[in-house]
Amino acid sequence: MNKKKLVFSGVQPTGNLHLGNYLGALRNFVSLQKEMECIYCVVDLHAITTFQDPSQLTNNVLETVASFLATGLNPEKSIIFNQSSVSAHTELAWILNCVSRIGWLNRMTQFKDKAGGEKEKASVGLYIYPNLMAADILLYKATHVPVGADQKQHLELSRDIAQKFNKDFKCKDFFPLPEPLIPKNVSRIMSLRDGTKKMSKSEESDYSRINLKDSADEISKKIKKAKSDSDTIPDNFKKLEDKPEALNLITIYSEVSKKDINKVMIEMSGKEYSFLKTKLAEILISEITPVGKEIRKLLEDKTHLRRILKKGKEKASIIAEENLKNIREKVGLL
């Protein structure tokens, strides 16, 4: 059994990464690389479960790599590569398709959410992509996976698949059961226009999110126009439970400033939301604009970004091919 701690996580290259990605994933990735061995993958095969413009997809992959580097990921410490460059991912995904059960996939709520009432028109890839996600994780025998609440169900599926593989092929502990790494105190970052919806790249209005490449002026405008509340700020965040937009602004301020939300409530109690917005804009500009500047700088040298992906692919392939060789032997494939 693999005793060492190994982290695997992937990010879809679907356009500008935003504040939710930064607080919910990227900032945590940087912390984890200081503690464990880490593999960070740009999951371009997951992206094509819905149609992507080919030239835009290529650009999005490189921009995601630039975002990784701009937020502090070090390619000398962490393996950074794009999923499609290591063919072992798709080969293991097929093997795991034959281990996973239809009933398990039918319980995946994200497919239901994304397909909506158009389930018959959704791609097969969208339906079975949790199996590919399991292959991504198990290919490297990852022991830990940083996940948000919306991905926890997929990680549980990965554990189920690992257990069934180990049992079916009589190889106890061959695949470790990956543990979720859920960042402490990191709350979901919601839309600036609708506090009941997660901040998303797919939402039509750009005023719903803070993009990592936004200028200071854009950040200031978006926070100023963000929905809040006409009352003054209460002294307890529980009093904001029926005011999701106001709660979201408090949450973002707490996360970016790294202050406990209860302390933030005391600090802001009795003040107008305009005061909070001014303070929030200031700390967001301080935190985010240097990242955006670095992303733009890195995107000026796409050859450098491609080199990083190539080196990452070479490192990932060594691990992947060795593990896949053993997997083939377990299954009986020549």
Image (tube, grey):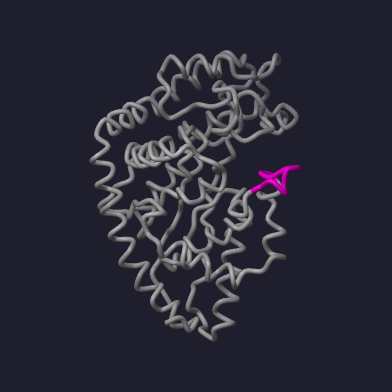
Residue 84: x %, y % from top left: 41, 54
User: Taking 185 as reference, is 314 above or below it?
Assistant: below
Q: Residue at x 38, y 56 (%)?
A: 39
Q: Nearer the viewer, residue 113 or 238?
A: 113
Residue 290: x %, y % from top left: 34, 27
Q: Is residue 74 magenta?
A: no
Q: Report the magenta residues as a range.
A: 113-122
Q: Residue at x 45, y 32 (%)?
A: 16
Q: Residue furthest bottom?
A: 170
The answer to whether residue 262 is seen in the rendering is no
| Left or right side of 304 for 217 | right
Count of residue discs: 0
Q: Is residue 119 magenta?
A: yes
The answer to whether residue 277 is seen in the rendering is yes
Q: Main secondary structure of the magenta part?
A: helix
Q: Nearer the viewer, residue 201 or 199?
A: 201
Q: Nearer the viewer, residue 199 or 16?
A: 16
Residue 86: x %, y % from top left: 37, 59
User: Taking 23 as reference, is 329 above or below it?
Assistant: below
Can you say which quadrant of the picture contains the N terminus?
bottom left
| Left or right side of 132 for 303 | left
Q: Residue at x 45, y 41 (%)?
A: 13
Q: Residue at x 39, y 48 (%)?
A: 31
| Left or right side of 44 for 317 | left
Can you say which quadrant of the picture contains the C terminus?
bottom left
Q: Quadrant of residue 313?
A: bottom left
